[in-house]
Amino acid sequence: MKTILFNPFKKYQENTLLGIGVAATIIGSLLAYAFYIRFNGAFDLHFAPDINLWQPFIDNSINIAIVFLVLFFLAKYHNQKTRAIDILNAVLIARIPFYLVALMNINNTISRAIEQMMSVVDNTIQINMTAIPIDAIIILSIFGLITFLAFIWFIVLLYNGYKIASNAKGGKTMLFFALALILAEIITKAIIIIVPY
Amino acid sequence: MSRLPIKCPSCEQHLNVSQLSCLKCDTIISGSYPLPKLMQLPQDDQDFILQFVLHSGSLKKMALQMEISYPTMRNKLDDIIEKLLHN
């Protein structure tokens, strides 16, 4: 079970992983459209009141392409034998936790809690905490915790997939991996902000 | 079955074979023979090489049969090559 959740790349063949990854990306994009989520960054997730069907698909395509390219070049630099399919599978599968987080906005639960919170916080220097509905605080706290756990899960999956694809070892691996992810985040954010769609 | 020790438990150096005996006639040969490179590898690495040869050198076939992904298999082989080069 631990292997399936955190390191499926160790056990499953590339075609199985690719099939699951592509299916998850399509379902995840549809979920994002249904629950008003934008993936506007390599590891970003925001609520958007106005959303088109194609926007989550383009968001995911940009995020997957950029993270793939950055990690693939890093992996190739480390190990010439690295295959593109293994890095692509790692990127596709690692995004599944983000798609699960999108499910939390069923009936706009999170969006409404954020609106309730913002209506109290907006244009106010001194925030009256008692004016914030307690259920909004509870919902947002649970959402924050689950999002944080999903982010950790994403990183663990991506790192394990990257390590198996490149056979990278040693202390510097994690540092270069982290730097690559920061670079991917900057590039994806810039593309999504600059290119109108 | 007891495993062939490949490293000295005291100083971690590679061991040499100092005695060989014939089980049929009890002839004993003494000397100092280094272990072949493959035999200096840990047992699981030797088992991997044996399986690799039995699968005609196909990591893909091995991966499918052992239900382990191809890159995991290839990494194991790369690690063994690395050990052989530095032994």
Image (cartoon, coloured by chain):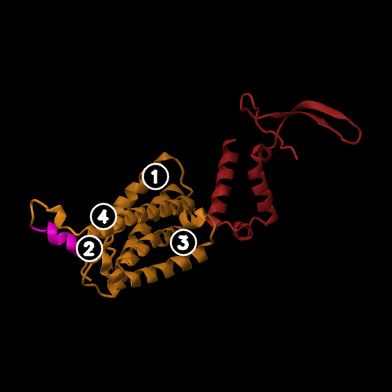
Chain colours: A orange, B red
Q: Which residue occupies 59% across, 44% down?
A: B80
SS state under label 3 = helix
Q: Residue at x 66, y 36 (%)?
A: B40
| Residue ID at (23%, 71%) | A197
Locate residue B41: give its quadrant: top right
Amino acid at the residue labelled 3: Ile
The secondary structure that most of the magenta stretch takes on is helix
Q: Give the range drawn in magenta.
A: A115-123
- Closer to the observer: label 2 or label 4? 2
**Picture coordinates of residue A48 (x, y %)?**
22, 67
Q: Which is more N-terminal, label 3 or label 2?
A: 3
Q: Residue tagged by mark 1?
A: A174
User: Of residues A46 and B29, which is closer to you in this image?
Assistant: A46
Considering depth in this image, is A78 or B12 the residue closer to the camera?
A: B12
Q: What amino acid type should be assigned to the residue bearing mark 1?
A: Met
Marked residue chain, label 4: A
CA–CA distance between discs 2 and 3?
Answer: 40 Å
